[in-house]
Amino acid sequence: MERLLQYMDDIDDLVGAFGLFYEQFRRLLLMVVALLVSLALIASGVLLAIWHPPSALVACLLLSITLLYRSLRAPSGEPMQST
């Protein structure tokens, strides 16, 4: 019985070690994905501004108006919460 408990403890330690490795890998993967998405958004905005400036101006104005509206409608003293 003692050996079985020892084996189960070793298996639990092994699973915990894989969990720690997985967590670091997941954080790295999420950071890389966020960086790639950010770069893609920046590149698409630049390309839109080069190829069709009026559409880029409209997109910029809509984003600015939306951000201004959200900052004005947020309760005072509380940070904005994304929905």
Image: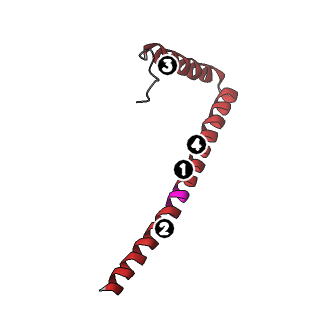
The mark closer to the camera, 2 or 4, is 2
Position in image of residue 33 (x %, y %): 57, 48
**Precedes in sequence: disc 1 or disc 4:** 1
Answer with left or right where residue 5 lies relative to residue 59. left
**Label 4 crowding class (10 Å Cα cut-off): few <14, some 14-19, many 20+?**
few
In this view, the residue farthest toward the left is: 1
Residue placed most toward the observer, 71 or 24: 24
The mark closer to the camera, 3 or 2, is 2
Q: Which mark is residue 3?
A: none
Distance between the alpha carbons at the discs numbered 2 and 4: 28 Å
- Which residue position holds label 1? 30
Residue at image location 65% in from the left, 25% down from the top: 52
> Which amino acid is tagged 3?
Thr
**Label 1 crowding class (10 Å Cα cut-off): few <14, some 14-19, many 20+?**
few
Answer with left or right where residue 79 lies relative to residue 33. left
**Precedes in sequence: disc 3 or disc 4:** 4
**Label 2 crowding class (10 Å Cα cut-off): few <14, some 14-19, many 20+?**
few
- Which residue position holds label 2? 18
**Precedes in sequence: disc 1 or disc 2:** 2
> Which amino acid is tagged 4?
Val
Image: magenta residue range:
22-26
Q: Which mark is residue 66?
A: 3
> Which amino acid is tagged 2?
Phe
Element type where label 4 sits in the image: helix
- By secondary structure, the bulk of the magenta-drawn segment is best described as helix
Magenta region includes residue 2: no
Residue at image location 55% in from the left, 59% down from the top: 25
Q: Which quarter of the rendered picture does the N terminus lie within?
A: bottom left
**Precedes in sequence: disc 3 or disc 2:** 2
Distance between the alpha carbons at the discs numbered 3 and 4: 21 Å
Residue at image location 57% in from the left, 44% down from the top: 34
